[in-house]
Amino acid sequence: MNKTRIYYFLAFISIIFLGILSRKISFIPLWIGDFLYAVMIYFLVRIFLPFKNAFLVALFSLLICYGIEFLQLYQGEWMIELRKTLFGKYVLGQGFLWEDIMAYTFGIFVVFMTEKFTLHYLNQKSA
């Protein structure tokens, strides 16, 4: 595993921790958890595609988030049972909400822009 993947992995683990923490603290709005979920997906994709264009990673991450959210419209018996598990609850969610789509979009946009500006700053600094 190269350095870049390690950094993305550490960010991924940190975001998982923050996301779980955000669900345990009552005064944090629920959309923050969805925002962090999208950021986590972005870093997960980055672990596997560390040198791909950031826009493509953002687009792919957004499609994953949207896909999982729209999958919540499916109410097959086996899917309902899967959603009752800890994995299903945290990964697949419970029900479709347009607010989640907005939070995912905002999360991906923020992490994409942050990465672009951070990398741009680091590239200028090293030049």
Image: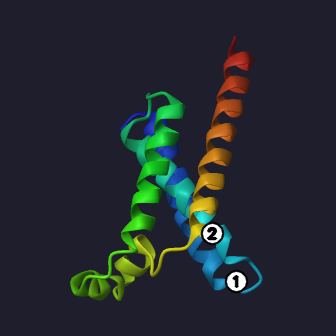
In the image, what residue type sits under mark 2?
Glu
Mark 2 or mark 1, earlier in chain: 1
Q: Is residue 9 visible?
A: no
Q: Residues within 10 Å of mark 1 (few under 14, many from 20)?
A: few
Residue at 52 percent across and 41 percent down: it is: 58
- Residue 119 is situated, as x and y percent measured from the top left of the image, at 65, 28
Mark carried by residue 97: none
For residue 10, above or below residue 32: above
Q: Quadrant of residue 122?
A: top right
Question: What secondary structure is found at the residue carrying circle 1?
Answer: loop
Residue at 74 percent across and 19 percent down: it is: 125
Q: Quadrant of residue 49?
A: top left
- Residue 105 is situated, as x and y percent measured from the top left of the image, at 60, 53
- The one of 24 and 63 positioned closer to us in this rendering: 63
Q: Residues within 10 Å of mark 2 (few under 14, many from 20)?
A: few
Q: Is residue 97 left or right of residue 2?
A: right
- Residue 124 is situated, as x and y percent measured from the top left of the image, at 73, 17
- Distance between the alpha carbons at the discs numbered 2 and 1: 20 Å
For residue 3, above or below residue 88: above
Question: What secondary structure is found at the residue carrying circle 2?
Answer: helix
Q: Is residue 25 left or right of residue 92?
A: right
Mark carried by residue 99: 2
Q: Is residue 99 left or right of residue 53?
A: right
Residue at 72 percent across and 86 percent down: it is: 26
Q: Residue furthest top?
A: 127
For residue 126, above or below residue 17: above
**Image depth: mark 2 or mark 1 in front:** 2
For residue 122, above or below residue 61: above
Q: Which residue is mark 1?
A: 25
